[in-house]
Structures are given as structure tokens and as C-alpha cells.
Amino acid sequence: MEILDRVEDTFLQDNLSPTIAEHATQCNSLFHKHMAVPDLVPDPTIMDDQLARFKLWASNMDVYGTPDVSLDYRLRSSATVLEIIHQLLDIICDTLTSSDRGPPADSEQERQHLSKQCDSKVTRRPNDDASDSDSDMDPAEDNISEITDTIGGTVIRLFRLSNAVRKSAKAYRAHENGRYRDGEQANKAMAESRLHTEC
């Protein structure tokens, strides 16, 4: 009986991870939270664009669909693809969370103060000023870069992965339909296959 209990515990532990729908909802709420912060990004249309592309991906893949046709259901036997999608959603969540914080308010003042102290004690080379200006990036510009590069690139990867999932589902459906010859069993199998693999 102990063996069965351990198997059930393992099974229950596997269900502790969020579904793709729950993870996408978390990303969606972080997008809205990020958009509510004023002056985090100088051009709010950049964030609107990324949110619209994310929602388009979720809609096209039926992320929030009914339990029997949702993306989670269709990928129930593809643990690797599920894991990759969760990793991509984690990247979006982490990027939105990290760009919300921004740099500490005192950091620029502290750097200027330390720079003045160092200038009085040490002779600086002419190239030192250029390297300092390269590292001093405006936080709003840094946020734009994170949003367009990291989030935009991740959404593109989600679209590409989703296209691969669709192609695979169509190929599998064609393969399964080819196994049946004629009759009621073939029609039933084709209808069931279409129901569970249509995107």
C-alpha cells in the first residue's frame, strides 16, 4: 500500500505546476501592471503592441479554451513542449517584473560622488569618460530595449513553437486518418481526431 501512496503523491506533485492558461494570465496581469506605471516607458504604444501580440498568440492557440480543447489539453502528452512554453512565459514574466523595479534613486548620485572623489585622487585616462557614458543608459531606454528585444523576441518564439505544434497536429491527424479504410469506425475516429487536434 505504501507504494501506491508514493505513486499518488508523485502524481499530485506533477499537478502543482501552473497550467499554460494560468501562466499566461499571470503574464497578462504583469503587462497591465507594467502599463499602469507612468513614465516607465516613454512611448506606451510599444507596450500596447507587445501585449496585443501576446494576446494574439494566446487567442490563436486557444490558451483559454475549454478544458477539452485548450492548449494544455492538446499538449498533455508533450512534456517537452509544455516545459518550453512555460520557460518562455517565465522569461516574459521575469522581464516585466525586473523592468518594473528600475534603478535605485540614489545610485546616480552615489556614482557622481564617487567619481568626483576618484578624480581628485587619481589621474584618469581620456578613454575613461567614454566608457562611463556607454554604461550610463537612461532607464526608460533600457526598458524599451528589454521590451522590444526580450519580450518581443520571446513572443516570436511562442508563435514559432505554436506553428510547429499546429503542423505536427495536422500531420498526426492525417497519419491517423490514413490508418482507417472505410466505415463507421473511420468516420468516428476522424471526427474525434479533428475535435482534439484542431487549432
Image (spheres, rainbow, N blue to C red):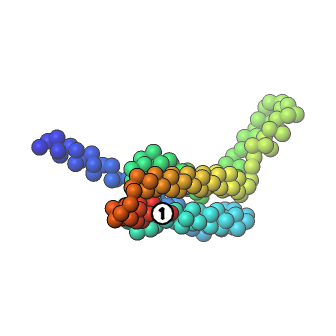
Quarter of the image where one finds residue 102: bottom right
User: In the picture provided, is 30 more to the left or to the right than 190?
Assistant: right
Residue 80 lies, in percent from the top left, at 45, 45
- Residue at the image position 16 percent from the left and 41 percent from the top: 3
Instruction: Identify which residue, 198 or 85, lies in the foreground.
Output: 198
Q: Disc 1 residue type?
A: Glu
Label 1, on which residue? Answer: 198
The N terminus sits in image quarter: top left
Label 1, residues with CA under 10 Å away: few <14, some 14-19, many ≥20: some
Q: How many marks?
A: 1
In x, y percent, where is residue 194? 44, 63
Is residue 180 found left or right of 102 in the rendered image?
left
Q: Nearer the viewer, residue 59 or 17?
A: 59
Task: Point out the residue furthest to the right here.
Answer: 126
Res 49 visible: yes
Q: Is residue 102 visible?
A: no
Q: Quadrant of residue 54?
A: bottom right
Residue 17: image x %, image y %? 38, 53
The residue at 83%/32% (across/down) is 124
Residue at image point 63% right, 54% down: 156
